[in-house]
């Protein structure tokens, strides 16, 4: 079954067939699944850090959800989607339609032509996009864990959630974005017709992963992470059960992340897309976990539970962009290759003496890159049509299939989008983290780091025993 034609501007998707309430409910439930991923991140990060920093990392996870909600309401949604639904919007950044738009939700509930919150869909979409933004910010906290100051965290989270991330969202997921193959109908606005990143391998995960890499590079390793010869010194996390529970919760949440990115369920053809996304997500995660643990066994001579966890996450990130436009065998290969991408990136970080306690860059940055590129390899010609309606030239023709099917343009569009996104995120994140470092507010003192931030900053240990 071929994919449906291009989705209309997402703020009006639920108007199709008069099923506004059902689509709003669907999107809200899928958003709850994604919100629950914050619990998964919290458990995974708490289990991976040492017990002396448990309260600190959990506080940051809680504040990601709180601060992200306020920022996304105040201006984040506006930067991402402020002119969605208009034909002449800004290709770079969302703007205030009619003087308000999505900023502070001030333009919602107005007559058609602006945002219409009366059917609930717009507000459900706000919630869905908010939980995506919170996930992107949470990725960064793991890379600078156990040595970043709280004030630095508040600043970098605000900048990422409020500016760096939503600009990328606008490029790829808004109907005016210059990198949007799925939503920008006027292809003359786009580069090579735009890229396809269905649920955010690049938009969410690579953005968070690249920012995490910049943060880890600038803040420098934890004390004692590398010896005098530059060899990595193991710093095992406090709780394997926390890591496993966190991974399972994240995996479950991904069924909101990927299938939910249809943004609706009632339009014709959207059910099969949702189902295909769920199957591809499952296969990629499963093969990722198996591949990493057995490949690592060759070198470590052990079956490392942590490797299974990160392998599963690597598979999930790798398939996020292409879960709707690949066949199951292609999803299997995407996860399989993603396992090696993760493993190689993780070992490269150690070789470069960059300390990333959660492997945030290897899992989200490197595998996010691969996930977007994989669409240009495995994108099936009957499914990549999602995003083109046939009225803007033959941009959904054979050249927009993955190159395994004889296509060429789509692979180029994916690669160009990746280069532009990396340049944007890396340049702004590096400048931000260097500014925090030069201001003396990026890293805690040596005394605080050695004692642990729970005792030094949060009133004592997380455990009373």
Image (spheres, helix red, strand yellow):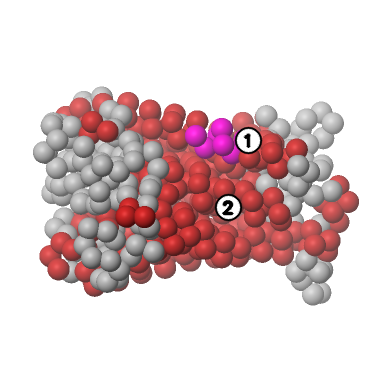
Disc number for residue 158 = 2
Tell me the quarter of the image containing the C terminus.
bottom right
Q: Residue at x 21, y 69 (%)?
A: 20
Q: Is residue 448 visible?
A: yes
Question: Are the two marked residues, 2 and 1, in contact with CB atoms closer than 8 angstroms?
Answer: no
* Highlighted range, magenta: 424-431
Q: Based on the displayed image, in which of its 4 quarters is residue 372 positioned?
A: top left
**Which residue is disc 1 drawn over?**
431
- Left/right placement of residue 2 relative to residue 80 reads left
Q: For residue 210: magenta?
A: no
* Secondary structure state at the residue bearing disc 1: helix
Q: Residue at left 33%, top 65%?
A: 108
Q: Residue 221 versus residue 180: which sits nearer the camera?
A: 180
- Residue 197 picture location, percent across and down: 34, 42
Look at the image and say whether residue 430 sits in the magenta stretch: yes
Location of residue 314 in the rendering, given as x and y in whole percent from the top left corner: 48, 45
Q: Which residue is depicted at the point 27% across and 59% down?
A: 114
Is there any visible trace of residue 282 in the rendered image? no
First-in-chain label (2 vs 1): 2
257 vs 357, left or right, is left
In the image, 456 versus 382, the foreground residue is 456
């Amino acid at each position: 079954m071929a994919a449906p034609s291009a989705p209309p501007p997402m703020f009006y998707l639920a108007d199709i067939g008069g099923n506004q309430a059902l689509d709003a409910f669907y999107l809200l439930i899928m958003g709850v699944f994604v919100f629950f991923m914050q619990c998964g991140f919290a458990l995974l990060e708490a289990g991976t850090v040492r017990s002396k920093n448990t309260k600190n990392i959990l506080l940051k996870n809680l504040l990601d959800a709180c601060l992200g909600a306020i920022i996304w309401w105040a201006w984040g949604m506006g930067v991402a989607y402020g002119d969605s639904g208009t034909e002449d919007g800004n290709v770079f950044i969302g703007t205030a339609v009619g003087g308000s738009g999505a900023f502070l939700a001030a333009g919602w509930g107005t007559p058609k032509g602006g945002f219409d919150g009366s059917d609930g869909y717009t507000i459900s979409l706000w919630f869905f996009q908010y939980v995506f933004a919170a996930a992107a910010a949470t990725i960064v906290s793991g890379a600078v864990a156990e040595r970043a100051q709280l004030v630095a965290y508040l600043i970098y989270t605000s900048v990422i959630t409020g500016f760096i991330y939503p600009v990328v969202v606008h490029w790829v997921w808004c109907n005016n974005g210059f990198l949007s193959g799925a939503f920008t109908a006027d292809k003359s606005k786009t580069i090579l017709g735009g890229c396809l990143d269905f649920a955010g391998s690049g938009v969410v995960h690579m953005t968070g992963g690249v920012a995490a890499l910049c943060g880890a590079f600038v803040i420098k390793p934890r004390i004692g992470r590398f010896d005098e010869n530059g060899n990595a010194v193991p710093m095992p996390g406090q709780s394997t059960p926390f890591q496993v529970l966190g991974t399972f919760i994240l995996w479950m949440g991904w069924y909101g992340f990927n299938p939910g990115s249809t943004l609706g369920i009632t339009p014709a053809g959207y059910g099969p897309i949702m189902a295909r996304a769920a199957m591809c997500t499952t296969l990629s995660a499963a093969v990722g976990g198996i591949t990493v643990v057995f490949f690592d066994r060759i070198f470590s001579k052990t079956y490392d539970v942590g490797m299974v966890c990160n392998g599963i996450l690597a598979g999930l990130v790798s398939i996020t962009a292409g879960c709707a436009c690949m066949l199951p065998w292609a999803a299997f290969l995407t996860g399989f290759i993603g396992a090696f991408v993760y493993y190689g990136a993780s070992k490269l970080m150690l070789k470069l003496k960059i300390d990333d306690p959660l492997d945030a860059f290897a899992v989200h940055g490197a595998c996010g890159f691969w996930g977007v590129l994989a669409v240009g390899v495995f994108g099936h010609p009957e499914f990549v049509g999602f995003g083109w309606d046939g009225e803007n030239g033959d941009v959904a023709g054979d050249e927009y299939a993955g190159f395994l099917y004889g296509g060429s343009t789509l692979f180029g569009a994916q690669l160009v989008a990746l280069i532009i996104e990396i340049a944007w995120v890396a340049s702004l994140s590096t400048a931000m983290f260097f500014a925090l470092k030069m201001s003396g507010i990026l890293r805690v003192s040596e005394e605080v780091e050695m004692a642990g931030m729970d005792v030094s900053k949060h009133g004592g240990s997380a455990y009373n025993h």
